[in-house]
Image: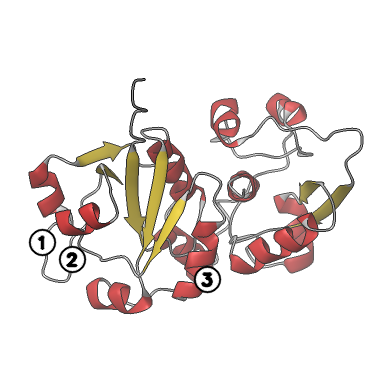
Amino acid sequence: MASEQKPVRVYCDGCFDLTHYGHFNALRQAKELGDVLVVGVHSDAEIKRNKGPPVLNEDERYTAIRQCKWVDELVEDAPYSCTVEFMDKHNIDFIVHGEDITVNADGVDAYHEVKASGRFRTIKRTDGVSSTDLVGRMLLLTKNHLADERSSALAQKLPFHSSSLSTMTTSRVLSAFTSSCHPKPTDRIIYMDGAFDLFHAGHVKTLQAAKARGDYLIVGIHEDVVVNAYKGANYPIMNLFERVLSVLSCR
């Protein structure tokens, strides 16, 4: 009998501070390159030492990434500069990272050793969103990230109620994040709605608690104009498209 082929173990790491759909899209792309996705999340101390203090603490960031439906294993307190020794310890075949270069506190490419070993792969970086951009929206009180009130033909076809989506929304991206799972006639269906702005560990735990009350969870997400009407200022910080994809990334 032929032996079973060894599953390909892919590794992806990061700070994952103020998690957004760009992070989740990177994890989705990484999972497509192998069978098992192992994700390393840096500790507060490691991030502070290499680039400055994070906004969210390590436990919040661990929870946010652990809930992602493309993540199979999570490594807490992952090293900022990855080594071949670390990869071998966790049986990693290769590392996946975006096209940008990450440097450590010494100004050295954090993946230089892995690249030299030939066990490094790149994926396309998701344009239009970053943790730095989200912080900028909060500090500058900008509103240009919010969707307008114009309805779109696409919005009427989406599996959630919406009449205002940003122009960057495409059926392709939504399709990549959406699972074709439908409730059975005997399922107890639970509904929960909210803004789910700046998707975080608190949202994850709330959704998990709601799901535990039944068999199938339906989540409603308020439009930008609705959230802004009751919260004011430049809320929501994430637009509808960004908030929908964050929730859809949840397992």
Q: Is residue 100 above or below residue 151?
A: below
Residues marked 3 and 1 touching at CB (< 8 Å): no
Residue 108 is tagged as 1
- In terms of secondary structure, where does tag 2 sit? loop
Q: Residues within 10 Å of mark 1 (few under 14, many from 20)?
A: few
Give the mark, 2 or 3, whose residue is nearer the N terminus: 3
**What residue is shown with label 3?**
60
Give the quadrant of the N terminus. Answer: top left
Q: Position of residue 145 (x, y in %)?
A: 55, 51
In this picture, residue 15 sits left or right of residue 89: right
Residue 98 seen anywhere in this rendered image of the structure: no
> 182 left or right of 75?
right
Disc 2 crowd, CA 10 A, few/some/many (<14, 14-19, 20+): some
Residue underneath mark 2: 104
Q: x%, y% of residue 222?
A: 76, 51
Tell me which residue sits at (43%, 45%) in the image. 27
Mark number displayed over residue 89: none
Q: Secondary structure at mark 1?
A: loop
